[in-house]
Image (cartoon, rainbow, N blue to C red):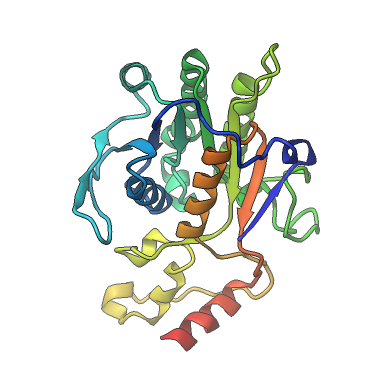
Amino acid sequence: VQCFWKCSSVSSISTHLYWNMSKIKIIVTGASGMLGRALHRLLLLEFGEYAVVGTGLSRLQVSHAGSTEQQLERLDLLDHEATSRFLQCHQPDVVCHCAAQRFPDAFEKRPDESIRLNVESTRHLAEECKKLNSVLVYISTSYVFDGGAVSRVLPPYKPNDSTNPINNYGKSKLDGECAVNEVLNTNCDGSRKGIIVRVPLLYGEDCTDLAESPALEMLKAFLPKDQNCGVKKGIDNWALRFPTSCEDVARVLKEMIDRRVTGDTYHVSSPHGMTKYDLMKLQCNIL
């Protein structure tokens, strides 16, 4: 896994910068999702270092390998008053904001609600974190770039490259980034408490359904017709993706928390680029 950051942030990363308390209090939103589960699971293994609260909305129980089923706290991020009460109650040092409407098709079906979750709820979390002097780690996406479709600039990208989202999901995540920067990274005292982490196409080791992982969803083409509704989709062989393990991203996020990195924009990604067609061939070889 590669981690890219703006040059101004490199000097802020030090293995000797730790939080001044016995346990770091962390809230993980979207802890029922693929990346949220991986991060929640990893932090729970370090129970001596972290006091972790995972939140979800409809799915409130998750199973982690090697441990008992974990109960999540219900939190509707669209309810700003409830969110404020929740954060005031738990007084977190860090909020890792993994919750989002991350499926472009689902986004288009309910655009107003998706924007409220991806943008307005993110801004509200940032404002609450500012009140509490907490760090917000906001999970964004490589969809803030166009992949070369319009700009003809192909990935991989660096954090300070020009963004150009071409779908509403990417635009909403970029708007969420702007909200985090405006609220947490423009303080008069110079403090920067908003960490933006862009991730690419993700896959996880504990997916319960192919649809949960964009990197695995194309395997539906090999399902029997009665399970795949008889629909066949074309697979492109030009756009580069960088499929990345959620477990690897979670380890980087934990390291960023431990090292107390300065608020900025970071890219966490596998260095191995491939097209969807390449990825499908690789999966077929494994199967």
Between residue 84 and residue 78, name the one nearer to us.
Answer: 84
Residue 183, image quadrant: top right
Q: Position of residue 19 (x, y in %)?
A: 51, 29
Q: Is residue 237 shown above or below 23? A: below
Q: Is residue 46 shown above or below 88? A: below
Q: Is residue 144 shown above or below 154? A: above
Residue 72, image quadrant: top left
The structure residue drawn at horizontal position 32% and vertical position 64%, both measured from the top left corner, is 209
The structure residue drawn at horizontal position 59% and vertical position 43%, both measured from the top left corner, is 197
Quarter in which the N terminus is drawn: bottom right
Between residue 113 and residue 208, name the one nearer to us.
Answer: 208
Q: Is residue 211 shown above or below 162? A: below
Q: Position of residue 268 (x, y in %)?
A: 61, 52
How many marks do you count on the picture? 0
Between residue 249 and residue 50, name the one nearer to us.
Answer: 50
The structure residue drawn at horizontal position 54% and vertical position 83%, both measured from the top left corner, is 281
The structure residue drawn at horizontal position 33% and vertical position 46%, both measured from the top left corner, is 44
216 horizontally vs 71: left or right:
right
Q: Position of residue 130 (x, y in %)?
A: 53, 17
Quarter in which the C terminus is drawn: bottom left
